[in-house]
């Protein structure tokens, strides 16, 4: 079996954006590493740490730096970028859809398109029209998928997955797990992949 990298991410997370956009190609370059998509909600994680909102809003200096750094990162990876006029954006519907698609072949492209709606096109990604357009463009039954995403069992599963993230020590996004080894931040994606590759050759 190919080694697997767990990818814990949130659509409202700026630094999750470049990771979503490059993780599949980068994983393939490191020896066909399998990506395990793990959508979760940052809000409850922040609340458990005593924050009422994103730390990028709590600390204005950190927030100002983050926006400049995001522009640099997107130039580095040749990823489209436009600073969102709303931050952080609610992303409950697209996150629930991501939970349903986590093991389906369309997951990677779906996540890329939702991220671009937020960080390249500055659109409300929690809007049914936006999510529906993305699903339609992928040739998927948008109505059926969104109906399942709105059901209570799906909502409960996302809450449970978020609790799993918290119990494993996740405090931000993106976070990667190579086995029990945790790596945090877009700039640690390459380290996580290299760790898996090196472990697989021992």
Image (tube, helix red, strand yellow):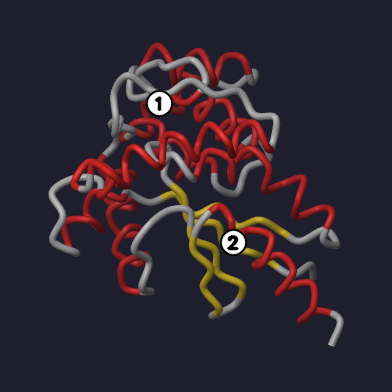
Secondary structure of residue under mark 2? helix
Percent position (x, y) of residue 53?
Answer: 19, 45
Give the mark nearer the N terminus: 2 vs 1. Answer: 1
| Front-most of residues 12 and 156 | 12
Which residue shows up at 58% across the image and 40% down it? 18
Q: Is residue 3 above or below residue 33?
A: below
Which residue shows up at 70% across the image and 30% down it? 78
Which residue shows up at 49% across the image and 15% down it? 121
- The residue to which callout 2 is attached is 188
Secondary structure of residue under mark 1? helix
Quarter holding residue 201: bottom right
Q: Is residue 186 above or below residue 117?
A: below
Percent position (x, y) of residue 122?
Answer: 42, 17
Quarter holding residue 202: bottom right
What's the distance in space between the residues labelled 2 and 1, CA to CA?
33 Å
- The residue to which callout 1 is attached is 146
Query: How many callouts does the rendering have?
Result: 2
Percent position (x, y) of residue 200?
Answer: 81, 79
Q: Is residue 142 above or below residue 199?
A: above
């Amino acid at each position: 079996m190919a080694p697997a990298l767990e990818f814990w991410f949130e659509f409202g997370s700026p630094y999750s954006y470049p990771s979503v956009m490059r993780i599949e190609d980068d994983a393939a370059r490191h020896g066909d590493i399998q990506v395990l998509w793990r959508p979760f909600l940052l809000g409850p994680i922040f609340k458990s740490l005593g924050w009422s909102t994103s730390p990028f809003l709590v600390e204005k200096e950190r927030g100002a730096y983050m926006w400049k750094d995001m522009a640099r990162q997107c130039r580095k990876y040749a990823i489209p970028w436009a600073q969102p006029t709303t931050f952080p954006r609610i992303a409950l519907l697209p996150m629930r859809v991501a939970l349903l698609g986590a093991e389906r072949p369309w997951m990677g492209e779906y996540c890329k398109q939702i991220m671009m709606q937020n960080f390249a096109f500055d659109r409300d990604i929690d809007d049914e029209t936006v999510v529906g357009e993305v699903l339609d463009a992928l040739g998927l039954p948008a109505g059926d998928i969104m109906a399942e995403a709105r059901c209570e069992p799906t909502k409960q599963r996302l809450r449970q997955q978020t609790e799993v993230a918290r119990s494993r020590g996740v405090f931000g996004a993106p976070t990667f797990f190579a086995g029990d080894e945790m790596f945090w931040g877009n700039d640690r994606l390459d380290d996580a992949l290299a760790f898996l590759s090196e472990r697989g050759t021992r």
